[in-house]
Amino acid sequence: MKNIDRNGWSAELFTDAEWKKSSLSGNLGNCVEVAKLESGEIAMRNSRHPSGAALVFTPAEWTAFIGGVTQGEFD
């Protein structure tokens, strides 16, 4: 896919995605899954709605997001 804003697209449209769920995810199924796309971007979806909307991050955005999570910016 061409590098355009794909936020909100159905996760099913990312045919190159190999979705991965954290090993720390609980049994309730309320988790997110991530996939590295061929474009180098990272997609995220809700594991309970695998065909629902996905968020797509550039590598720099993903690094900033993970940094914010690690530093507690979203508490």
Image: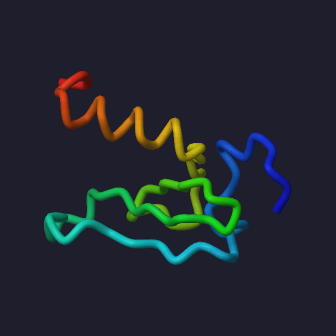
**Vertical placement of 63 versus 22: above or below?**
above
**Vertical placement of 63 versus 13: above or below?**
above
Rendered residue at 48%/56% (across/down): 45
- Figure quadrant of the C terminus: top left
Q: Position of residue 21 (x, y in %)?
A: 32, 69
Q: Position of residue 15 (x, y in %)?
A: 69, 76
Residue 13 appears left or right of 11: right
- Figure quadrant of the N terminus: bottom right
Rendered residue at 33%/40% (across/down): 66
Rendered residue at 25%/25% (across/down): 74
**Vertical placement of 9 versus 34: above or below?**
above
Residue 53 appears left or right of 49: right
Residue 26 appears left or right of 53: left
Q: Depth check: 41 or 14 in front?
A: 41
Q: Quadrant of residue 64?
A: top left
Q: Position of residue 65 (x, y in %)?
A: 39, 35
Q: Quadrant of residue 51?
A: bottom right
Q: Which color mode does the image show? A: rainbow
Residue 49 appears left or right of 39: left
**Vertical placement of 12 versus 39: above or below?**
below
Q: Position of residue 42 (x, y in %)?
A: 54, 55
Q: Quadrant of residue 7?
A: top right
> How many dots with numbers?
0
Rendered residue at 19%/64% (across/down): 25
Q: Depth check: 22 or 62 in front?
A: 62
